[in-house]
Image (cartoon, coloured by chain):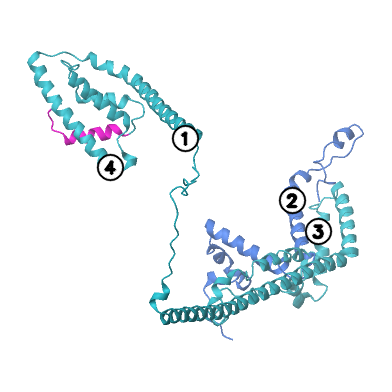
Amino acid sequence: MLSRLVLRAAPAALRSLAPPATVGVLHVTRPLHTTQQRSAPLPPLPEKGGEVRHGLIPEEFFQFLYPKTGVTGPYMLGTGLLLYLLSKEIYVINHETVAAACILTVIIYGVKKYGADVAAFADKLNENNIAMLLETNYRERLLTVYNEVKKRLDYQVAMQNLKRQKEQDHMIQWVEKNVVQSITPQQTTVHTMVSTTVADMKPPEVKCWIDNHEILYMSLAFISGILSAVLAFAIIHLCRKKCRRPHQTLQEELPTQTVTEESEKNRQSWQFLQELFEKISHYSSKCAAAERFPLEVLVLVSSIKTNFDNGNLQGKVPMYGKVQYKLSSSRRVGGSDLWVKRCFEGCTDSSGL
Amino acid sequence: MAQPPVPLKDMKLMDVKLGQLPSWLAMRDYTPGGIVGAVRRGYDRYYNKYINVRKGGLGGISMLLASYVVISYIWSYSHISVVIFACDLSKINLVYFDTEHDRHRRYH
């Protein structure tokens, strides 16, 4: 009985069978059904399940005991077992027994009375479904065949039409050419001079595709767009500058050195900064856009450079460690200290590390 | 019909002689994969024999339910198997609410 419900899932498999959308594949004429099926169709389900006697005990048990005890053997075994269980109270009779007895009675009565009807009903459901699906499948495939044949015939028709049209055109052309050739050359020139005065010539009424008003509005919009973009950039730049300023004050706290050392160190650090800047621009031009040096680092280094140029760093030597600290303390630098390190390694070691 | 001698561990259970049973049991595959495989094989056998058929009957599921009933009875036997004491009038109230004491006699 359960199998009939299981079988209702079989139509779903049929729905996925032979989709007629493989139209495009069938252009080439090839023999069908000659290759070995990769997935053989399922073997048909067995008709009936294993025999079960009294709904509880498989038939194999009775067959197993038959040679030794005959037909009544299993029943005697069952009776003996039952009496043993009852007498030793391995099976206890209590309220649950009564409940189980009532339930079993009802179930058995229901099964005996309505079992066959339910089975027939389920079978009927199954059958209809499959027949319908088979029919549908067949019709779909028929439609596919029809479409294919129609396409081939259409192709032939189109070919014939095209051929006839080409022949017509060619013939017309050829006839015209010969006719024109047969006429003398002077007769082909037709004099078409029309005399017009200047006054008759009116100004060309070319409709302007854009009005004065529209030009004005568009130019206004353009200018305002540019101005707003410039404003946005200025705001962003100012914000960035504000974030940079507290970091720059750290540079003021560097220890002062003697003058000679200062000038020497300044010269070295200037050299070092120059090399660093070159390296950075070299790297940033070489790398892919995603790895490009972040804007803040460039801004920072350029600010160091301008400060150096202006002489703001007189007496204050930007050592490698401080620069790296500043770089790493800016917020969105990410892996840029690694970049800086790479740049530094390329530079000469003149910064006195 | 002389069959070639089949190694012990490949023999089916029904062909194993009683004396060979312990060694046969010892040679079975008790790894988790082996146990899962055994469970799957058993399930497949039962399913294909009783349920996956055209005209299945009641026996397929009724055997499963009956075995479920039996197993749950076995598991709850210890609750049931405590003896009902002889009912004194004074003890009736105690016994009435106590579902564990179901056996009618202590000794059988």
Q: Chain of mark 1?
A: A
> Chain for mark 4?
A
Q: Colour of chain A?
A: cyan
Q: Position of residue A89 (x, y in %)?
A: 81, 52
**Which label was assigned to residue B72?**
2
Q: Nearer the viewer, mark 1 or mark 4?
A: 1
Determine contact: label 1, label 4, CB under 8 Å: no
3D distance between C-alphas at marks 2 and 1: 90 Å
Classify residue A315 as left or right of residue A139: left
Please tell me if label 2 and label 4 are on a single chain. Answer: no
Q: Name the element at disc 1.
A: helix
- What range is drawn magenta here? A335-350
| Marks 1 and 4 belong to one chain | yes
- Cα distance between the residues tagged 2 and 3: 20 Å
Task: Locate the N terminus of chain B and report the quarter of the image it occupies.
Answer: bottom right
- Kindly identify which residue carries mark 1: A215
Q: Name the residue beneath numbered marker 3.
A: A84
Type of the residue with mark 1: Ile
Give the label on residue A287, or none.
4
Q: CA distance from mark 2 to mark 4?
A: 72 Å
Q: Inspect the image, locate mark 3, and give the three-letter code of the amino acid beneath it.
A: Tyr
The residue depicted at 24 percent of the width and 32 percent of the height is A340
